[in-house]
Each structure stands twice: as C-alpha cells, then as structure tokens.
C-alpha cells in the first residue's frame, strides 16, 4: 500500500538521498550534459533543508507500507509570497569549481523565467501567493500507479488551505512530468527549445543533445 506524508525535518535526509539517486539520475539535463552525482550530493540536502525551513509545509513523500516505508516518490514544493523574502536560489549553494555543469543548469532555469510575468499570464493580482513545484520523482518500478498524480494533488490541497495562494506553477524538463501536469489541468504558458538556448558565454550548451525535449512552464 502506498501512503503519503508531509516531508518533515526528521525525514528530509532520506528524501534528499532518494532524489539524488532517482531524480538526478534520470533528469534530462543531467543525462544530456554529463552531470555526475558528485555535483549534486555535496549541496542538495542543505538546499532541501532550506526549502523546507523557508516555505509552508506543502512537500510530500510517497511510502510503500509493504516494504518498511520505502520511499517511492517525492514532490518538493514551495509557497512564494511576494510580500516576503523568498528562499535562496539554488545557485547560492553551488561551487562553480566543483559543480560547473549544475551551475549551467541552474542558470538556464533562471533564464527560463526571465521576463515572464506569471501574474499577468494567469490573470491574477501581483499580491497572489504562488504554489511552485521544484522536483517531482517516482521510483523505477512504481510508475503507472498514480503516485505522481497523488503527490501533486496532496501538495495542491495543502496549498489551497493557505490564504492568498491562487497560482500553481512548475517547470517541466521531461515528457513524463509534462504529461502528468497536462492531465491534471495545467496549461503551458511558455516553451523553450533546448537547442536554441545560449548560455551567458554565447555557447549553445544543449546543441546536438537529441535526448532533450522542449522545456515548458505550466
């Protein structure tokens, strides 16, 4: 049986380990650019801890009760409040000398939202709080059971209980997560072709990487 729980301080290390070894192993950016787990392990638990400390509790874990509560899925969400200082960006946790590929990826994700007015796109006032998904992952062998859908739904229910939250959004980097969110009623508001993206040094960092599909914001 699969059950779902809020991610607590007591469990965040185990969740971080799951995401390092599941999400980052399969994430298209990493596969295309040759990201090694050594460029993730050093900082990711601290980053996750920071997100949990600075956001309302809206992140969930999926547990297999038949296998001693093995973690089989996780979703990391945050609530962005325009009237409060938000969490530190991922790049502030990275060392350019030790994690150069992850720096490229984090820069791309920041550039993706550059110039996007999410409030205007969604027809909501600029005072609205935003429920944003950062990571969604389901373990190999557990696909097709609706786990991703339930993780998203649990996060949305928690967000809806918070006064002022009127927008839900996410960036999706794979066909899997793209399909999950479209089925849940999300709409695409921006699409970026990987092959057309130039880094700040003018280099097309994804050029020739056929494994990548387009990046979407929903």
Image: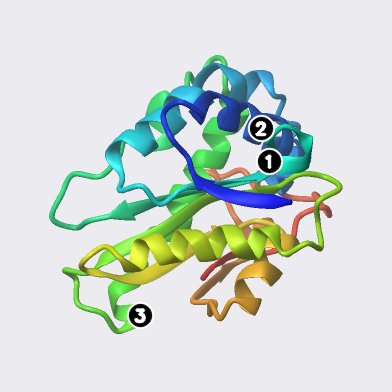
211 and 80: which is toward the camera: 80
Residue in view at x 83 percent, y 45 percent: 140
**Which circle marks residue 23 in the picture?**
1
| Residue 136 numbered tag | none
Residue in view at x 46 percent, y 59 percent:
155
Q: CA distance from mark 3 to mark 2?
A: 33 Å
Q: CA distance from mark 1 to mark 3?
A: 29 Å
Q: Position of residue 212 (x, y in %)?
A: 76, 55
In which quadrant of the rendered view does residue 55 lie?
top left
**Does residue 201 appear anywhere in the picture?**
no
Percent of width and height locating residue 120: 29, 79
Looking at the picture, how far across and down is residue 7, in whole percent? 47, 40
Looking at this rendering, what residue extends furthest in the bottom direction? 123
Q: Are marks 2 and 1 in contact (CB under 8 Å)?
A: yes
126 relative to 28, above or below: below
- The answer to which of marks 2 and 1 sits earlier in the sequence is 2
- From the viewer's perspective, is 54 left or right of 143? left
The residue tagged 3 is 122
Crowd class of label 1 (few under 14; some 14 to 19; many from 20; radius 10 Å): many
């Amino acid at each position: 049986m699969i059950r779902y729980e809020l991610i607590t301080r007591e469990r965040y290390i185990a969740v971080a380990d799951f995401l390092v070894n599941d999400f980052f192993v399969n994430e298209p950016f990493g596969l295309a650019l040759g990201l090694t787990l050594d460029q993730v392990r050093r900082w990711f638990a601290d980053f996750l801890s920071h997100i949990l400390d600075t956001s309302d509790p809206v992140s969930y874990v999926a547990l297999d009760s038949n296998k001693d509560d093995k973690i089989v899925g996780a979703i990391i969400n945050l609530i962005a409040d325009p009237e409060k200082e938000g969490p530190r960006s991922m790049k502030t946790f990275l060392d350019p000398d030790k994690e150069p590929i992850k720096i490229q990826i984090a820069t791309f994700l920041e550039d993706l939202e550059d110039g996007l007015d999410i409030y205007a796109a969604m027809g909501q006032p600029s005072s609205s709080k935003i429920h944003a998904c950062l990571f969604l992952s389901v373990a190999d062998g557990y696909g097709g059971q609706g786990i991703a859908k339930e993780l998203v739904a649990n996060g949305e229910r928690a967000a809806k209980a918070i006064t002022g939250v009127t927008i839900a959004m996410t960036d999706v980097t794979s066909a899997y997560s793209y399909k999950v969110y479209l089925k849940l009623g999300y709409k695409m508001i921006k699409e970026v072709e990987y092959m057309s993206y130039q880094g700040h040094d003018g280099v097309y960092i994804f050029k020739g990487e056929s494994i990548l599909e387009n990046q979407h914001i929903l």
